[in-house]
Image (cartoon, rainbow, N blue to C red):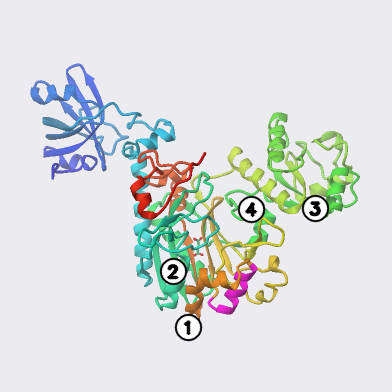
């Protein structure tokens, strides 16, 4: 080794020892005669001192070095003089008195500061990712990610799971996105597809009798990217035989609690994890990924306006819509400017408008005097209606009521989004809290783009809940699935389900999804055939590792959890991918690229 000890590990116990260090110049300060360098390696920083009197040659060289040069330094561990101890640095009690220095590599001026947590444009960070990853903040995230994955492996190993790899070059495995496809040279005109997930493969492993499988699997999905999506993501893919839903959920709950408590013990985690049905989650939070760190639940107040003269509500109710609201405690005096912003936000989300009612600082139970109340509809509602609303929403003095009316799903979604932004802007969210929940009983199907078309809400292999299969052909939209998600702090962390293991049922579901028998056999024949040879009941789940690390580390972007991510437009600026290939490769593949103009 070029070094005898790591920079960040030096403490008083090493006093007077001769050490050899190697690392990057994090910072250099010239104090008259004496030069101070902070040397950085993965373990942290140590201050090194060059004194021209005791080591003139080393001092001379130290004068020439700059940030990010790589050095090897020999020296003695010494006490820092009185008054220069740095309690913010783990190594801050000591420093190295250098007697020799060797320059191992020089650096140009870096495109951004490595030694500061400054805001750097993401395209520059990704273009120079190897330097971005030198930043202690990024190193910490990747170390956390390593610990999370190691914890998962050890935990599952303890429960007798075995890790099995499955192929990357495979065939279409639908999870609701487009496939990335790879042309075959040996079979010109034929293509592999990269797995959107190992779904069918893990089910085949259950048919093979492995009973408990997992894999830290890469999944490839060609879809429009958002802040928390990437063309390729990593998931803990897991499958178990002979299980019911709650067997899978208990295992995942135990895994998450143990993982958080051992790796990031400073975070608060709720336990046990509540189970909320999809419909309840939509009704109370307007989303299937509720942030449960704060209240502001949605309340249906349609019945308060059944006889309303207010035309907007009247019309909505006549058309079968709803009137719903949230109570924001203590915000009855919210400024007009902020209220206007909320109204604008509601409109942008698709609502016709947003009604607000600010209750006065004092609200005696009989005092629903409209004169005292700030509201965008004080001219249109009656005292009686207001009273009903206050009672129905259990609101009290100085509360703010935000009300949206319209088609149920849209109303819920708009209020759900307003709820999320208010949770953040009013600082109702404890950033140190992790609030997990299982969302269960999703619909099996969602309406597709065209009338009468259905898509799988989770994926095509999900089992309908007991007693629900009878409605597959007659009322597919109402079929409830034995499926579940794990959510945390408003993000979906995992999805899973109990699977179909019977050919006839699987064929019926695939038919609802619009596949004919020929397509079913061509695309899913391998899985269906395995059901003909004795397939156990089975189910599983797949937590996304990138997203999990993002939540655990309290980050905003999934890209910060991935060593070499792609930009939002699916580009890697460091490698310049995707890029063209040489004609000779295309010829071998018998592929011609059409002009994209
Ligand atoms: N294959 C599913 C997914 O990738 C997860 C599962 O059902 O286990 O979302």
Q: Which disc number belongs to residue 287?
A: 4
Mark 4 and mark 2: span between their CA atoms?
31 Å
Q: How many neighbours does mark 3 have within 10 angstroms: few (below 14), some (14-19), or many (20 or more)?
A: some
Q: Nearer the viewer, residue 38 or 562?
A: 562
CB contact under 8 Å: marks 2 and 3: no
Tell me which numbered mark, 4 or 2, is placed earlier along the sequence. Answer: 2
Q: Which residues are magenta?
A: 501-512
Q: Secondary structure at mark 1?
A: loop
Question: Which of 303 and 223 lies nearest the eye of the viewer?
Answer: 223
Q: Earlier in the sequence, mark 4 or mark 3?
A: 4
For this view, does 168 lie left or right of residue 319? left
- Residue mark closest to the camera, 3 vs 1: 1
Task: Tell which circle, 3 or 1, labels the residue nearer the N-terminal end.
Answer: 3
Q: Which residue is mark 1?
A: 534
In this orientation, which residue lies closer to the viewer: 561 or 78?
561
| Residue 48 figure quarter | top left
Evaluate if marks 4 and 1 touch, with contact meaning CB atoms under 8 Å apart: no
Q: Quadrant of residue 423?
A: top right
Distance from label 3 to label 1 (Cα)?
Answer: 49 Å
Element at badge 4? loop
Give the image location of residue 108, x and y in percent: 26, 27
What mark, if any, has residue 201 been given in the picture?
2
Reply above or below: 223 against 521: above
- Neighbour tally class for label 4: few under 14, some 14-19, many 20 plus, Cα within 10 Å: many
| Residue at numbered disc 3 | 321
Q: Residues within 10 Å of mark 2 (few under 14, many from 20)?
A: some
Check disc 2 and report its element: helix, strand or loop: helix
């Amino acid at each position: 080794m070029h070094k005898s000890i790591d920079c960040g590990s030096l403490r008083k116990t090493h006093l007077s020892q001769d050490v050899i260090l190697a690392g990057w110049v994090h910072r250099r300060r010239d104090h008259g005669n004496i030069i101070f360098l902070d040397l950085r390696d993965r373990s942290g920083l140590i201050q090194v001192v060059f004194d021209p009197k005791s080591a003139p040659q080393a001092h001379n060289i130290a004068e020439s070095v700059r940030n990010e040069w790589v050095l090897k330094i020999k020296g003695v561990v010494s006490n820092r003089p009185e008054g220069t101890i740095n309690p913010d640095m783990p190594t801050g009690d000591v420093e190295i008195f250098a007697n020799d220095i060797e320059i191992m590599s020089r650096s140009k001026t870096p495109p951004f500061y490595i030694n500061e947590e400054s805001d750097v444009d993401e395209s520059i960070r990704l273009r120079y990712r190897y330097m971005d990853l030198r930043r202690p903040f990024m190193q910490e995230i990747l170390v956390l990610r390593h610990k999370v994955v190691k914890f998962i492996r050890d935990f599952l190993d303890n429960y007798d799971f075995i890790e099995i790899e499955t192929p990357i070059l495979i065939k279409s495995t639908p999870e609701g996105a487009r496939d990335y496809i790879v042309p075959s040279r040996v079979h010109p005109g034929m293509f592999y597809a990269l797995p959107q997930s190992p779904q069918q493969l893990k089910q085949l492993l259950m048919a093979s009798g492995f009973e408990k499988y997992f894999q830290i699997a890469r999944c490839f999905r060609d879809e429009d990217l958002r802040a928390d999506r990437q063309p390729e993501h990593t998931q803990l893919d897991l499958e178990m035989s002979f299980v019911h839903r709650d067997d899978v959920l208990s295992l995942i709950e135990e895994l998450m609690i143990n993982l958080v408590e051992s790796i990031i013990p400073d975070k608060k985690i709720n336990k046990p994890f509540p189970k909320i049905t999809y419909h309840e989650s939509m009704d109370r939070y307007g989303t299937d990924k509720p942030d449960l760190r704060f209240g502001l639940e949605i309340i249906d107040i349609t019945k308060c306006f059944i006889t309303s003269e207010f035309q907007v509500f009247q019309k909505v109710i006549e058309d079968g819509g709803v009137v719903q609201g949230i109570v924001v405690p203590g915000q009855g005096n919210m400024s007009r400017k902020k209220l206007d912003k909320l109204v604008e936000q509601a409109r942008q989300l698709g609502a016709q408008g947003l009604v607000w009612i600010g209750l006065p600082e004092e609200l005696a139970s009989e005092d629903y005097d409209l004169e005292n109340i700030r509201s965008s509809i004080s001219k249109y509602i009656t005292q009686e209606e207001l009273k009903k609303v206050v009672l129905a929403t259990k609101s009290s003095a100085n509360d703010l009521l935000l009300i949206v009316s319209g088609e149920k799903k849209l109303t819920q979604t708009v209020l759900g989004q307003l709820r999320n932004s208010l949770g953040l802007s009013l600082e109702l969210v404890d950033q140190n809290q992790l609030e997990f929940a299982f969302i269960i009983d999703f619909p099996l199907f969602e309406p597709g783009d065209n009338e009468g078309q259905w898509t799988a809400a989770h994926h095509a292999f999900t089992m309908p809940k007991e007693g629900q299969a009878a409605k597959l052909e007659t009322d597919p939209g109402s079929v409830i699935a034995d499926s579940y998600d794990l959510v945390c702090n408003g993000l979906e962390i995992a999805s899973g389900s109990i699977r179909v293991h019977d050919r006839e049922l699987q064929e019926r579901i695939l038919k609802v999804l619009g596949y004919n028998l020929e397509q079913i056999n061509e695309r899913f024949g391998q899985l269906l055939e395995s059901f003909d040879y004795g397939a156990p009941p089975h189910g599983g789940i797949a937590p996304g590792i990138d997203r999990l690390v993002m939540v655990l580390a309290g980050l905003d972007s999934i890209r910060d959890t991935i060593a070499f991510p792609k930009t939002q437009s699916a580009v890697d600026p460091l490698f310049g991918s995707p890029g063209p290939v040489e004609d000779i490769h295309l010829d071998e593949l018998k592929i011609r690229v059409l002009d994209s103009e």
